[in-house]
Amino acid sequence: MSAAIMSDDEPQYIMKTPPFDTRFPNQNQTRNCWQNYVDYHRCHKIKGDDHEPCEYFKRVYRSLCPNAWHEKWDEQREEGTFPGKI
């Protein structure tokens, strides 16, 4: 975990990286990205939009996945062509 602290007149930001996940031990984090994206949307589907623990999965996939990937997956979910089971 690293922290970026701004000067006294600017707000403070704490930057975190996703913790190590033993299911994805390799450098390539593509599967980790995919799984957290799917888990986030499954969590919202089951628990509802206001369930705070679901946000963990969102923070992880937003950190690991390139923006273009999850934007494309969002479009696919809207069109009903997303290849995963949510």
Image (spheres, rainbow, N blue to C red):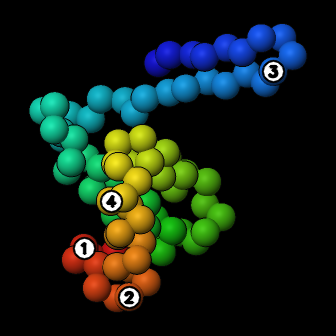
Judged left or right of residue 4, residue 20 is: left
Residue 75: x %, y % from top left = 40, 77
SS under mark 1: loop
The answer to whether one can see residue 59 in this image is yes
Q: Mark 2 belongs to which amino acid?
A: Glu
The answer to whether residue 42 of the structure is visible from this angle is no
Q: Residue, x 50% and y 27% (percent of image)?
A: 16
Spot occupied by residue 48 in the image (x, y as percentages of width and height): 58, 71
Quadrant location, the C terminus: bottom left
Q: How crowded is mark 3: few (under 14 residues within 10 Å), some or many (20 or more)?
A: few
Considering only order in the chain, which callout, 3 or 4, is on the residue closer to the N terminus?
3
Q: What residue type is labelled 1?
A: Gly
- The mark that comes first in sequence, 3 or 1, is 3
Q: Do the residues labelled 2 and 4 touch (CB within 8 Å)?
A: no
Q: Which mark is residue 10?
A: 3
Residue at position x 84%, y 11% in the image: 8
- Mark 3 vs mark 1, CA separation in Å: 42 Å
Foreground of the two, 83 or 41? 83
Q: Residue under circle 4?
A: 69
User: Residue 82 sits in which quadrant?
Assistant: bottom left
In the rendered image, the vertical position of residue 26 relative to residue 14, given as above or below: below
Can you identify the residue that label 1 sits on? 84
